[in-house]
Image (cartoon, rainbow, N blue to C red):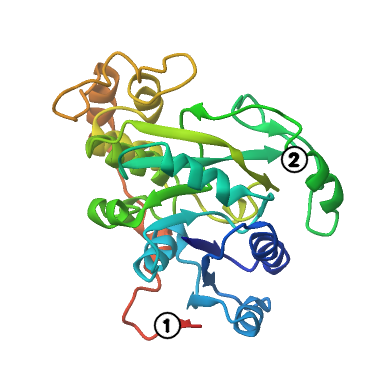
Amino acid sequence: MFSIVIPSWNNLAYLKLCVESIKKHSKFQHEILVHLNDGSDGSLEWVRSQGIKYTQSDKNVGVCLSVNLLVSQASCDWVLYMNDDMVASPGWDAGFIDAIASVDSDLVMFFGTLIQPEIGKNANMIRQNFGETPQTFDEAQFLAQCMADKRGDVEGVASQPTLVHRKWWSMLGGYSLEFSPGMSSDDDLLMKFWVAGCRTYRIVGASRFYHFGCKSTGRIKHNLGGRIFVMKWGVTPIEFSRLYLPSLRKPDGGKTADNPHNCVRASWLGKLRRVGYALRYNYPLEDIEAWDTMPGDGKWHSGN
């Protein structure tokens, strides 16, 4: 039904729990593809022993390259991108399938509902603590309580898990490599779908996932994603979210969402920031590990 793509960077315990939850809690059989960044912690041997389709790079190449590579090898029409530090709940896939059946277009973006120990000010997440690590994860409590919050679908956007049609991912170029290793790449993908005409962004209440929380991003040097987004689109990520994307506060998508030309209007703030960044902008390519190992240099591997 779905091709599930999972990038992983030496997170074997999390990856095991993630994959096992998909296999145990899915109502249908799905294709699982994993990209191993390095994989020297035993991840490579484990995916081979499980017969999981995988790709590998000798170094961490970031989520943009990892996910694009996996999607290029996906065989299903619908692709779900999720992180290795997530645990799927029972019936997660049925919720997404119902969401697909409820719309008359495949130009949509669906998101899972995340359950986390800490959620900050994100009202779209559910706060429940079932453990901080795979070793302390309370599976029995998770299975008993994951649907206790009775919320349904929410018109709006979230982070992963993200479900899109493979056709649109390919047509729009997936994750743009200027955002490697990944900061603001999600904002850019949302924008590209919006420019293509997507107006259905939905967080699916029945598709729930436990998220341990950012177990890889804290280990990398972040790219200047917000700057790159402004230079590319002329608005800040916050402005794009507030003015164009749907939310509980403005289910119509915002006052500028009906632009007939499907193009964003550069804001004064965006224009000022673009000028400022242009005068002192330094894109730190030398700091991005994703450019250390590129396809074709003999350091990329794949297998089943």
User: Could you classify mark 1 by the number of other residues whose Cα lies within 10 Å: few (under 14), some (14-19), or many (20 or more)?
Assistant: few
- Tell me what residue is drawn at x 37 percent, y 26 percent: 245
Tell which of 109 and 118 is nearer to you: 109
Q: Secondary structure at mark 1?
A: loop
Tag 2 residue: 146
- Tell me what residue is drawn at x 60 percent, y 84 percent: 48
| Label located before the other in sequence (1 or 2) | 2
Judge whether residue 80 can be spotted in this image.
yes
Disc 1/disc 2 C-alpha distance (Å): 41 Å
Residue 269 rendering spot, x and y as whole percentages: 29, 19
Mark 1 belongs to which amino acid? Lys
Residue 133 rendering spot, x and y as whole percentages: 78, 54
Tell which of 67 and 250 is nearer to you: 250
Residue 20 rendering spot, x and y as whole percentages: 69, 65
Q: Is residue 91 above or below residue 56?
A: above
Q: Nearer the viewer, mark 1 or mark 2?
A: 2
| Labelled disc at residue 299 | 1
Q: Secondary structure at mark 2?
A: loop
Tell which of 260 and 93 is nearer to you: 93
